[in-house]
Amino acid sequence: MASQSASRALLTLKAGRPSSLPFRPVTTNQENYAIDAIVFATRRPSPSTKGSSDCDCSSRKDLVQVTVEALSNGPFAVARYQGQALFLAGVAPGDTAAVSITRKRPNYQFGRLVHLCRSGSSHRHPPCPFYAGCGGCPWQQVKEPVQRAAKISNVRETFARLGGIELRDHPRFVPSPFDWAYRSRVRLHLDQRRDLGFKRLRGDQVTPISYCMVAEPVINAELAAARELVRRLEAPIANLEIVAVGDGRVVLVARGRAQGIGAADRAAARRFLDRHRGVAGVVIDTGGKRARFGETWVTSGPAGNRQPAEVFSQVNREANRLLVEAVVEAAALTGREQVLELHCGAGNFSMALAPRAGLLAAFDKDPEAVAAARRNAARAGVFNASFEAADAASTLLRQAPQRIDVVVLDPPRSGAREVVAAVARAAIPRVVYVACDLATAARDAAILVRQGYEIKSAVALDLFPQTHHVEIVLAATRERP
């Protein structure tokens, strides 16, 4: 699997990097990156930051030397100083680091890595040359097995601390099939020169990039085209998303502030598509006013769903197949159940759930996603499912008097506190909860447990290697009154 990931990363670099760019990451012998807990800042060149036995940092009174203990449920690693947690970026468990304290809070502190005195066994040099300025992959300096172990630990710790739930035999951990070149869509921001890049860990400063090691090769291949589109548009574009279609082409989705889309921009988009055969279509969205040019639908999900490029989809195609399998397993359908699915999107889970259910009623607040889900169901021959554009909370209140056997929720990062509370009041026997944020998942799971539900299974899926993010699928059950 490691060799497959390396091959995909190699293809990514070859597809997306300019020929003048050296095919190797910047090494710490070339530049010494001083990494703040919040903002990465480049320092003047220094002999090395790889760690050395002759480190003289202890003689500097402005620095403290600490040993990194773990990775937090966030972009930082954790050391201990003065009996408190000290959060650092750019280090790995087992590292010994010289640190400048930058901020103090009552119960924890933040520090800036000044010098890596000694690398631990879990440390590696970040492969990406944009790592120091890009906030997208803050765990690159940590070897993958350590990343995965940390995610399992963070799931258990977060559920125990925030939810009071002990996941003794859980979660079952499912790694991503690929650690690099896995993202089928990336969102880039514009700097002051209208160049494209990623934001730093915090703040609005943008680091321009020439390729992204976690993006699919086809995305890197069209980065130059994306830059050209931005330069040719007059509309005030804030960010641009590159979405892989699934056939070797991409769709470019340019989003900006509220303003009409002028005739000049419409003509520019059409001329642009004539010149770039690798770009299937362009979407310009300025404050809800949207114009589409060319082919702007993409393929997503294991069922081959079709949807507008701007509609949400899971970014990791291969890992999403495993996510759908985990949701189907958690639902434990026998072909007779009445299933309510909330936040259904374009039908990523729906197309796998409906054939295993008696009836499926699916809802999402995005009308375009719902329209796509209806088309996908018709194309797949799924006739026992209905799709409606509606808010999740109001939907549940309306559906609660009916008999519902299973509810499947895939809420946004903010969670679904009110919806989960309504589910508990309705005493729906089985709840499948899909979450991309551990804190809100633990909070919402605690609501279910307090109302008599039992967590039957928990699966953690590594949809986002090189980051702290982890997707979790919970199955909770209770007896029907």
Image: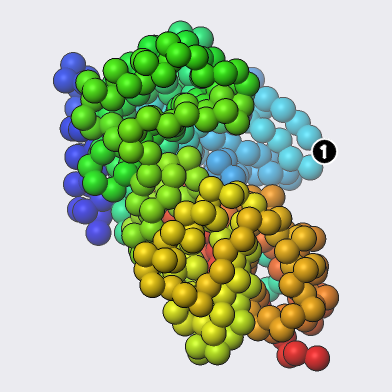
Instruction: Indicate the quadrant where residue 426 lies.
Output: bottom right
Q: Could you say where residue 133 lies in the image, as x and y percent from the top left? A: 46, 24
Q: Nearer the viewer, residue 340 or 20?
A: 340
Measured as percent of width and height from the top left, residue 408 is found at: 61, 70
Q: Between residues 191 and 88, which one lies in front from this camera angle?
A: 191
Residue positioned 29% across, 18% down in the render: 271
Is residue 324 visible in the rendered structure shown here?
no
- Tell me: 81 left or right of 351: right
Q: Quadrant of the N terminus?
A: bottom left
Task: For residue 350, say whether it is visible.
Answer: yes
Q: Residue at x 71, y 55 (%)?
A: 391
- Whether residue 274 sits left or right of residue 469 in the image: it is left
Please, is residue 348 above or below residue 166 in the view?
A: above
Residue under the image location 25 percent in, 55 percent down: 2
Q: Residue at x 75, y 90 (%)?
A: 480
| Amino acid on which disc 1 is placed | Pro
Give SS at disc 1: loop
